[in-house]
Structures are given as structure tokens and as C-alpha cells.
Image: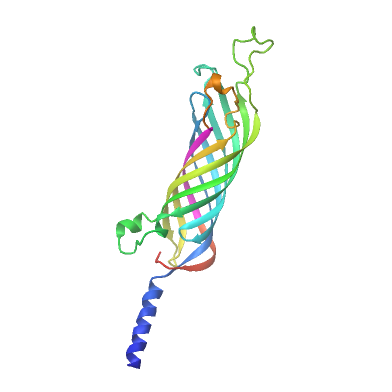
């Protein structure tokens, strides 16, 4: 009986241990991609965004971290916009982001399909965006006679700071190192950034005249790379 009990206990321990994996608690990464603006200006345009991230891994599939962005957001056209508005914003931003991956919620060990999609995630954050207009139509063309000497001046600021809320949807593709640890990630991400204020396009025109009703927004579609490092912690599932 004693030998049988010991064998059962040993077998359970082996099964439990085999169902665990180790992971690194920290990661950093970078990425680039195009963005598109959706502001009070009639038509947005394509710009670019570069970013860097530093994440703390509560688990392999739950993270909280910092993201910094630098890029160019633009929109409008002095010739085709109904109000002759046009802007280029060389912006920077810093946000705190939390992400939850599908692997935290599902049992993917017995399904190849679920295993392959465990890196799908959603996330939410908050932070600050620093807007700096490198080019903007501040005076409406051909209004000098009515608004001397330079014409009608569009309200707004060339430099400003606003609160920004990023919403993330994406996918992490995990790559193991030579020791079997998840060490690298290739990341695909779509991010909608909602700003609170009128600084993203540099215009703060009257709502009743310019139909200025919704928060300014820009979306980023990026490809990135991440590297895991730091202390190792065990996780209840295999990775």
C-alpha cells in the first residue's frame, strides 16, 4: 500500500510539473507603422508612427507597461478642404497600457487551433499626447478684405497637450530560444487613440459652424518586435 501510494503521489507530481512552464517577467520592444487621422478637418491623411514599449508580465498573457510614441499625423488639404484647412502634427506621447491575451482565458493545451491563437489580445490605456504643428493653415485664404490684414484666423493652438486613451487589438507570435523559453515576440497591433481636447489637428473652431462634435482620433497599424528578459516565474500552463 505504501509503495502504491508513493507511486500515485509521484505520478501526480510529475503530471503537475509537466503542466507548468517558466516565463520571463519583463520585456521591451519597438515597432513602426502607418497612422490615419480622424479629426475636425474634413479628410484625414496617412502619417507614420514609431514606438517603444516596456512591459511587466503579471502572467505570460497579462501585461501592464509603458508605451512611448513619436510620429507625424496629418490631414486636410488647403485646396480641397471645404474650409481650406490643412495640418501636420509632429507628436510624441506616453501612455500606460494593460493587455489581456486569449491564452489567459482558454485551455489551449489540447487544441492546435486554440494554441495557435493564444496570442490574440485586447488592451486599454491612458496617457498624454504632446502636439506640435510643424505646418498648419492658420489663416483662411482669400479673406483678407473681410478680416484685415491677414484674413480670418482659425482658432486653435500650434502647441498643446491632451489626454489620450489608446485601445489596442492585436496578436503576439511567440518564438522560443535555444533553452525552450519564450524569448521573442513578433507583434501585429491595431490601435485607436482617442484624444480629449482640440490639439491633435491644431483647430478649435466653433462647433455650430464647423460640425466639431467628436473627439479627435488617430489609428495606428504597426508591426513590432519584443524581447523577454529578467527574473523567471512559473506559470500553471505549458507555453
Q: Which x, y percent locates residue 118?
A: 38, 56
Q: Is residue 140 above or below residue 92?
A: above
Which colour scheme appears in the figure? rainbow
| Magenta-colored segment: predominant secondary structure | strand
In front of the other: 133 or 83: 83
Q: Residue furthest front?
A: 208
Q: How many marks?
A: 0
Residue located at (61% from left, 10% from top): 143
Q: Which x, y percent locates residue 151?
A: 64, 13
In which quarter of the view is residue 117 placed? bottom left
Q: Residue furthest right?
A: 149
Q: Seen in the image, is 239 located left or right of residue 48?
A: left
Q: Which corner quadrant holds the C terminus?
A: bottom left
Q: Seen in the image, is 116 located left or right of residue 150?
A: left
Q: Is residue 216 in the magenta section?
A: yes
Q: Which corner quadrant holds the N terminus?
A: bottom left
Q: Which x, y percent locates residue 13?
A: 39, 79
In front of the other: 83 or 115: 83
Residue located at (34% from left, 64% from top): 109
Q: Is residue 66 above or below residue 200?
A: below
Q: Residue furthest top?
A: 145
Q: Which x, y percent locates residue 93?
A: 59, 41
Residues shaded magenta: 215-226
Q: Is residue 180 above or below residue 206?
A: below
Amino acid at each position: 500500500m505504501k509503495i502504491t501510494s508513493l507511486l500515485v503521489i509521484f505520478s501526480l507530481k510529475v503530471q503537475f510539473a509537466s503542466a507548468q512552464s517558466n516565463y520571463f517577467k519583463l520585456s521591451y520592444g519597438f515597432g513602426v507603422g502607418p497612422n490615419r487621422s480622424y479629426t475636425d478637418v474634413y479628410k484625414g491623411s496617412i502619417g507614420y508612427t514609431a514606438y517603444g514599449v516596456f512591459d511587466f508580465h503579471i502572467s505570460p498573457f497579462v501585461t501592464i507597461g509603458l508605451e512611448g510614441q513619436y510620429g507625424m499625423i496629418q490631414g486636410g488639404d488647403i485646396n480641397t478642404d471645404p474650409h481650406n484647412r490643412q495640418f501636420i502634427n509632429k507628436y510624441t506621447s506616453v501612455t500606460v497600457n494593460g493587455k489581456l491575451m486569449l491564452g489567459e482565458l482558454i485551455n489551449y493545451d489540447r487544441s492546435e487551433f486554440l494554441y495557435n491563437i493564444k496570442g490574440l489580445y485586447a488592451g486599454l490605456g491612458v496617457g498624454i499626447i504632446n502636439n506640435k504643428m510643424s505646418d498648419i493653415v492658420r489663416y483662411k485664404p482669400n479673406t483678407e478684405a473681410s478680416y484685415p490684414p491677414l484674413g480670418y484666423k482659425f482658432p486653435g493652438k500650434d502647441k498643446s497637450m491632451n489626454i489620450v486613451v489608446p485601445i489596442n487589438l492585436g496578436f503576439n507570435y511567440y518564438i522560443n530560444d535555444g533553452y525552450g523559453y519564450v524569448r521573442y515576440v513578433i507583434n501585429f497591433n491595431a490601435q485607436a487613440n482617442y484624444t480629449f481636447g482640440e490639439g491633435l489637428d491644431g483647430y478649435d473652431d466653433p462647433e455650430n459652424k464647423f460640425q466639431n462634435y467628436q473627439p479627435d482620433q488617430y489609428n495606428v497599424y504597426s508591426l513590432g518586435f519584443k524581447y523577454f528578459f529578467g527574473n523567471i516565474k512559473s506559470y500553471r500552463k505549458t507555453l
